[in-house]
Amino acid sequence: MKGFDYLAPEGFHDAVWSYGLPESIIDIDKATHKEMKCFIRTAYRVTIPIIVSDVNKQGGPLSLIKSTFTTSLGHYYLNDLLTNDPDVLIISSSARKRKDPHLKDDGDCLVVAMVEATNDSFLFSKSLSSLRRNTLAMEWFQFAYGWMTQWSKSMACLLSATGDQLSTISLPLVTVERGANPLTITEQEVPLIRNELEFLGAKVDDPTTCFEELKSFIETFQFPGRLPLTLICKIVVQNIVSKCCAISVWKSGPVRSFGREGVRP
């Protein structure tokens, strides 16, 4: 729910410490955030500046990098929590499962705890109880650094399931109301979607739907009036090609797990 610019600087600083990077990076970052001028744009005019500290400059080029460093801590944190989780999702070769490896890579396996890009993310698990624990753990983590989940856009996805299933499930979350104790755990109902994943606005492992979305988007795209060729090229790159890449890139095979989408702030 909150943009990159509103993240607590401590998230980036903790990542610098955790990864063993020079602490001078933190000193420089703190210096850039000290006593910054902030102008408030109103319906009447721009106000005189106020002085703020310890916040990222809105639209600054480092906001995305700091966000990436902060979320990477969340990945490591969740991976550590899943060390002894019997329902963690692990991808491995069939040869490894049979204990009959033929190649060196057959002995490798990959723990899939969370995947994310831009403002979408998935948490993966093979059981609802495990998903609930992981969801609450990430709720606590992101709350510490100034993030909040956009629950109105969140859902749970159930893949390769048989039999009748509920239409909604309940997930735990921290309390974010003003004056409330954030350690108080409440429940949030989210819709349960069966045999379908959507990431960055694109269907996963559904090439037919992907093609139809691409075809429809390209054919219905409208240029605003008569424009010079240079501007048309820029619009194509920024508005058409980027959207097509987002739609077409997610064609990976299905993952048999519960998942939560849209929880990135």
Image: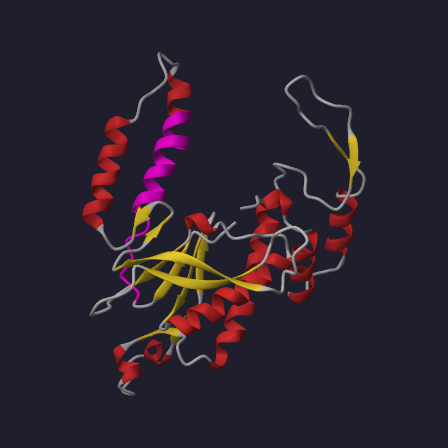
Q: In which quarter of the image is residue 108?
A: bottom left
The number of discs equals 0
Residue at 73% x, 54% y is: 25
Q: Is residue 135 left or right of residue 87?
A: right
Dominant secondary structure, magenta:
helix
The percent position of residue 53, horizontal first and vertical second, equals 77, 43
Q: Residue at x 69, y 52 (%)?
A: 9
Residue 37, above or below 43: below
Whether residue 73 is visible to the viewer of this picture, yes or no, is no
**In the figure, is residue 4 to the left or right of 111?**
right
In this view, the residue farthest toward the top is: 226
- Residue toward you, 64 or 259: 259
Residue at 30% across, 26% down: 221
Question: What colour scheme was applied to this rendering of the protein?
Answer: secondary structure
Residue 27 image position (x, y, % from top left): 78, 53
Q: In the visual, does 102 lie left or right of 25?
A: left
Q: Is residue 208 left or right of residue 20?
A: left
Residue 56 location, quadrant: top right
Magenta highlight range = 234-255
Residue drawn where x is 23% and y is 33% of the image: 216
Residue 28 belongs to magenta span: no
Residue 57 visible here = yes
Nearer to us in this view, 98 or 192: 192
Is residue 247 inside the magenta stretch? yes
State the image coordinates of residue 45 (x, y, percent, origin top left). Answer: 69, 18
Residue 50 lies, with reference to residue 196, above or below; the image says above
